[in-house]
Image (tube, rainbow, N blue to C red):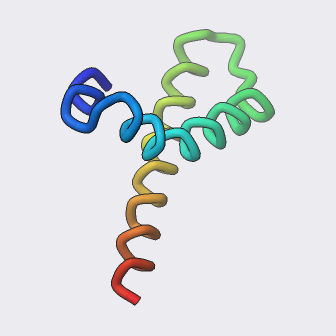
Amino acid sequence: MYSLIERLGIRDAAAKEMPALLIAFVIAELFYKFHSFTLECAAFLVTWLALSWLQARLVRLLSQV
């Protein structure tokens, strides 16, 4: 995360990652009930990664059209 902020700046990094972050947070809050902070945190981070990847792919696909 530090490298992303250092490379893009705080505003650009926040604008780029905020949609995926918020959706991942809602998904984790609603569905992840593992009774373990470590498992829930790991699942949240994997969800954020997957949503961020999907968002980047969609942006790239839509920019080609």
Q: Residue at x 43, y 68 (%)?
A: 59
Residue 30 is situated, as x and y percent measured from the top left of the image, at: 80, 33
> What residue sits 39% from the left and 60% below the top?
56
Quarter of the figure that contains the N terminus: top left
**Outermost residue, bottom side:** 65
Q: Position of residue 39 (x, y in %)?
A: 55, 19
Q: Quadrant of residue 44?
A: top right
Front-most of 27 and 3?
3
Total marks in image: 0
Residue 6: percent from the left, percent from the top?
A: 21, 26
Q: Residue at x 75, y 27 (%)?
A: 29
Task: Give the quarter of the image for residue 60.
Answer: bottom left
Considering only vertical position in the picture, is 5 above or below 17? Answer: above
| Left or right, residue 57 beside residue 8 | right
Q: Is residue 45 above or below residue 55?
A: above
- Viewed as shown, does residue 63 lie left or right of 39? left
Residue placed most toward the observer, 1 or 53 = 1
| Quarter that holds the C terminus | bottom left
Viewed as shown, does residue 35 lie left or right of 15?
right
48 or 36: nearer the viewer? 48
